[in-house]
Image (cartoon, coloured by chain):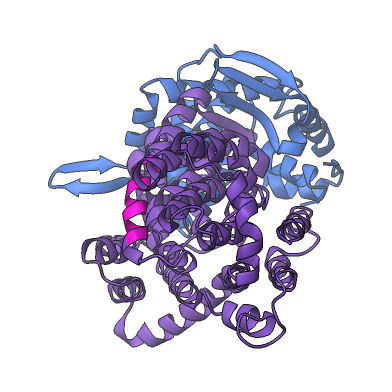
Amino acid sequence: MGVVILLIMAVGVVAMLTRKIPTAFALVLLAVAIAFAAKAPLTGENSVMDGVIQNGAPLLASTMIAIILGSWLGKLLDETGIAGTLVRKIVEFGGDRPVVVALGILAVSTLVGTVTGSAPAAMLAGIIGIPAMIAVGIPKVTAAGTILMGIAAGMPFELPIWQFFSTALELPVDTVRGFMLKLFPFALAAAVLFVLVESRRRGVEHAWALKSAPARPSQRERRGDAPWYALLTPVIPLVLALGFELAIIPSLLAGILFALFTTTRPGEYGKRLLRTLYSGFEVAAPPITLFVAIGMLLAAVKLPGAVSALEPLVKAVSPDNPVLFVAVFTVLVPLCLYRGPLNVYGLGAGIAGVLIAAGIYPAVAVLGLATSYNQVFGVADPTSTQTVWSAQYAGVSPQQVMVRTLPYVWAVALAGLCVTAATYL
Amino acid sequence: MTAALPTAAGPAARLAAVDDIAYGAELLASTPTHEGRDPELLRRWARAATEFGSAMAPVECRARVVESSGGLALGLLARYHSRPVPTVELFTDTIALAEETIDAYGWRHWYPAGSVRAAALAHEAVHERLHHGPAKRELKQLLGHTVLRLGRHRVHGHVAGADEVAAHAYARTACGLGRSPLLLTAALVAASSGKEN
């Protein structure tokens, strides 16, 4: 039976890879097929209807709320001009030295990456940041890669991600936070190295172009500079969640209120809050859809029938020696690209669920594995929305960005796996 | 990308009616960080960058020069890379289209035969000079964009796109062109997108 479930998963991966079915729909179909293969009853406890669809859909509800709040805060950063002001100030102060500009925009991307993820994060930092970097001579691929590496450096502190791994892997938020703190220095070092090494290797580029800047999604009016104290907004949720160990949702709400109070006239509070909240829903729709589907998949792979069928198979192929663990999972890194089977926002979440449910590795080791892969997926996957957006906006292909960034994020994954093996195995 | 050459006199006259400083200000306006800035301020910066570029001492293009096709697809006429070795890439298809456009618009008296290639080399030589030498600081001082004031001390900020305006102004002076290459760029944008202005 385990083989049948693996075959179903393989079919799902092919469907996602070939883009025959959108990832979220493919995951729902996978969940239902796995449940049937695991001989789950149609209704009742541990059933297809109740156990997988009814209970699985809201399994990651806390993550979905965190995503909505992150998207809301992201919209506020955009509408109040906070993100744009940060980038403009960096260009004005450091424009003579392209590397300084790139490092500054990397820092902005990192901050934005702690607030929200995916394409909205790339757009927040990149809409002004990418053409600004190109204007001071940073080559296009380096400019796109800088935004992505920055977002990935902020990812260990992205509160919705803490919530996701906490719920999906049934781990306390403290544990997730603890591992993320260990992962962050590697992600940051890789991001800074990317800018320094790529600047050294590629130098600067200036062109007599027929257009002075890449085509923008929409010709936006400058919204004026936000006051300097408003620029602290992205660090507010972080300080509260990290420094004061406040829960994720109130931390994000505090960031939203700080952005509002420091940039908006009192008479316009309600209007701005509502407008940005509704826009935030639009931004949050794709990840929420995905999290509904992942919840169902997690519920399916944790069904008793699925666990007992998969346990011997997964046990047979999973390395238990720490060195082998690092070696094997480092070699498998490319399998999280192109919506591959180790993508944590796809089948990878299901595999993580199997590894925990079958007791192959402790949950915290699976956290290390999944977050290490997430660092790769978040930057280099040519099918992930932030990579596609950044590359296309810079005027290059996502594959070019993947080739340039992959060595750096692969090294981050290796470091994350080493920490995992040394600490938890 | 297909190129449709405009032949009517109307578009040529309309494009030529806009002065070089206005084209410089337009280039700055479309450069990020200047969204919504006062048009008068942009015009002032464009004038300062133009004067700086026009007054620059002759710059020798020391970079390696390579020629290739494919510029129209990239939307480029020329490109300068500082690494691995300083190189100027000239895109022959875009240069050819520029020469054809000059003839079609009746602008040969402003842009003599072969001047587009020379202007491209001059333009990229300025980028090389601004990248490696102290000239960039001089341009910044001339633009006078204050980003921080501490008593009597002022910190001048970088004006994105000003080096581009300066490079075009230098190319115009160095190659003895009647008008800035910015006018030619505006015509090429229309020609390369197949639209008539």
Chain painted in blue in the figure: B
* Magenta region, residue range: A175-186
Work out which quarter of the rendered image holds the C terminus of chain A and state it.
Answer: top left
Chain painted in purple in the figure: A
The residue that appears at 57% across and 34% down in the rendered structure is A404
What is the quadrant of residue B52 in the picture? Answer: top left
Image coordinates for residue A351, horizontal then vertical, percent: 59, 57
Front-lying residue, A390 or A359: A359
The residue that appears at 37% across and 59% down in the rendered structure is A176
Front-lying residue, A221 or A16: A16
Residue B33 shows up from this direction: no
Q: In the displayed structure, would residue A290 be above or below residue A276?
A: above
Front-lying residue, A425 or A166: A425
Q: Residue furthest left?
A: B151
Residue A98 shows up from this direction: yes
Image coordinates for residue A278, horizontal then vertical, percent: 52, 81
